[in-house]
Image (cartoon, rainbow, N blue to C red):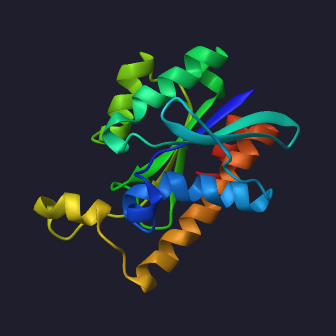
Amino acid sequence: MYLVIGLGNPEEQYAKTRHNMGFSTINKIAEKYHISFDKKKFDAIYTDTIIEGEKVILIKPQTYMNLSGNSVRQFVQFYKIPMDHVIVIYDDIDIEKGIIKIRKKGGPGNHNGMKSVVQEIGSDTFPRVRVGIGTPIYKNDMINYVIGQVPNEEYEILEKGIKVAAEAVIDILKNGIDHAMNEYN
């Protein structure tokens, strides 16, 4: 069984923001497999399904980004999921817009949602798919950059990254992390 977690903020207000690349990627996977999020537990909305022969729980924590780890920890502990079967998807300002990077493990960097996840589950040895959102022109405007609305022409570029991230997650489920890293990095 895999947990696939998209990090983001509640969608009604933050749906098309740079900080919601994790949610957007999870939504793209759900759309491809005609899955709806019909369950609530552990401060998240989620669904369980079979993707490429693997049992998968798709999760969107509803705690706001900076507290995402609370929800992730509860799912990991309840289902007793090994770290190599916990896949976290999130936005990354250090990666060019529309580009993704996959890692087997690593620190959270400056990403507050990932800091929360690493702290709460007590490990950084889980796979992650980072979706590039680019760097803001003015570093002191970071909050508005990540949670502000994105112009349509820029969002089209971000959507390319979302699509590739969804394909990469599916590849991890089907062929393993090493294959996906060789294919998508």
Image position of 170 with respect to 114: above or below: below
Q: Nearer the viewer, residue 123 or 10?
A: 10
In the rendering, at what x and y percent does residue 110 appear? 27, 41
Residue 23 in view in this figure: yes
Image position of 98 with respect to 67: above or below: below
Query: Residue most toward the bottom?
Result: 153
Residue in view at x 11 percent, y 60 percent: 140
In the rendering, at what x and y percent does residue 135 appear? 28, 63
Residue in view at x 75 percent, y 47 percent: 171
Residue in view at x 36 percent, y 75 percent: 150
Image position of 125 with respect to 173: above or below: above
Q: Nearer the viewer, residue 12 or 53?
A: 12
In the rendering, at what x and y percent does residue 11 appear? 46, 59
Query: In the picture provided, is 38 more to the left or to the right than 59?
Result: right
Instruction: Give the image quarter of residue 132.
Output: bottom left
Residue 81 in view in this figure: no
Query: Residue most toward the left?
Result: 140
Residue in view at x 30 percent, y 61 percent: 147
Image position of 143 with respect to 57: above or below: below
In the rendering, at what x and y percent does residue 47 appear? 69, 42
